[in-house]
Image (cartoon, grey):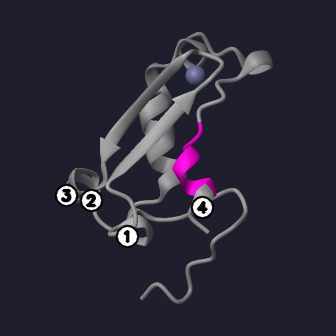
Amino acid sequence: MYADIKVSSSGARTLGSIEGRLTMLRLVCEKCGRSGQLRVDKLIEQHGCDYMLPRLKDDLVRDCPRMVRKDFADWCGAHMPDLVTLK
Ligand SMILES: [Zn+2]
């Protein structure tokens, strides 16, 4: 089932691909000075294993000040630092 999922350098993964490897998933936005962490098992409960992480990030940053005022010139820099170390 996971065989045809391409893992790109931008970290396009699914929740299922980090299940059991991460307990908490951190989301950091240095530009907005925000950070938070979410339990991976809860996320899978809510969204399912096939939910894409980039989509999850989009959901989570929706209330970021930069996203709210649609500041395209200085876009929100939210990222998930744990995915970088998870090769
Ligand atoms: Zn932000």
In terms of sequence position, does the residue under pointer 4 or pointer 3 come before the other? 4
Cβ of mark 4 under 8 Å from ligand 1: the answer is no
Q: Which residue is mark 3?
A: 45
Residue contact between numbered discs 2 and 1, judged by CB atoms under 8 Å: yes
Dots 2 and 4: beta carbons under 8 Å? no
**Residue 85 left/right relative to 71:** left
What amino acid type is highlighted by mark number 2? Ile
Three-letter code, disc 3: Glu
Q: Which mark is residue 12?
A: 4
- Ligand 1's quadrant is top right
Magenta residues (range): 79-84
Q: Are marks 2 and 3 in contact (CB under 8 Å)?
A: yes
Residues 40 and 61: in front is: 40
How far apart in space, not on screen, are marks 1 and 4 (Cα)? 12 Å
Q: Amino acid at mark 1?
A: Gly
Residue 85 x %, y % = 60, 58
